[in-house]
Amino acid sequence: MTREEIFAGVNEVFRDIFDDEEITVGEATTADDIEDWDSLEHINLIVAIEKKFGMKFTMGEATGMKNVGAMVDIILERV
């Protein structure tokens, strides 16, 4: 799976979780960039991303991601 394919999947999850078809995430996207991205939605995102890609983040990974690019890096290593 390529980085671009992972970003496409991640974008699908973000659009679903935030119910906003206009969302497009990039390497540097953070919670500050998406209005409703709070701690509860972060958990929902993590669970949905894990399900989408058939993998699990460690607790350290889930809490330590600084941006979407870091999330994609971890996914890329696992798939």
Image (tube, rainbow, N blue to C red):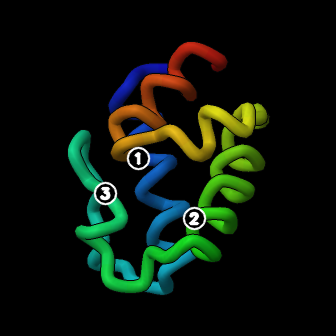
Q: CA distance from mark 2 to mark 1?
A: 18 Å
Residue lying furthest top in this view? 77
Q: 32 or 52: nearer the eye?
A: 32
Type of the residue with mark 1: Ala
- For the residues labelled 3 and 1, the Cα–Cα distance comes to 17 Å
List x then y, in percent, for residue 28.
21, 45
Picture residue at 73% right of the left edge, 32% below the top? 58
- Relative to 29, is 19 above or below? below
Residue pointed to by mark 2: 42
Residue at the image point whose x is 27% and y is 78% from the top: 22
Q: Earlier in the sequence, mark 3 or mark 1?
A: 1
Q: Position of residue 68 (x, y in %)?
A: 37, 45
Discs 2/1, front: 2
Q: Looking at the image, which residue is at 65% across and 53% down?
A: 46
Q: Which mark is residue 43?
A: none
Q: Quadrant of residue 5?
A: top left
Q: What residue is rendered at 27% in x and 69% in y?
A: 32
Q: Which quarter shows the C terminus?
A: top right
Point out the tag, 3 or 2, that comes first from the N-terminus: 3
Dot 2 or dot 1: first in sequence order is 1
Q: Nearer the viewer, residue 7 or 27?
A: 27
What residue is pinned by disc 3? 30
Q: Position of residue 33 (x, y in %)?
A: 24, 69
Looking at the image, how many numbered discs can be counted on the residues? 3
Task: Name the residue type under label 2.
Answer: His
Query: Seen in the image, is 19 located left or right of residue 41?
Result: left
Residue identifier under label 1: 8
Residue type at numbered disc 3? Thr
Disc 2 is placed on an element classified as helix
- Which quarter of the picture shows residue 24? bottom left
Q: Secondary structure at mark 1?
A: helix
State which quadrant residue 75 falls in. Answer: top right
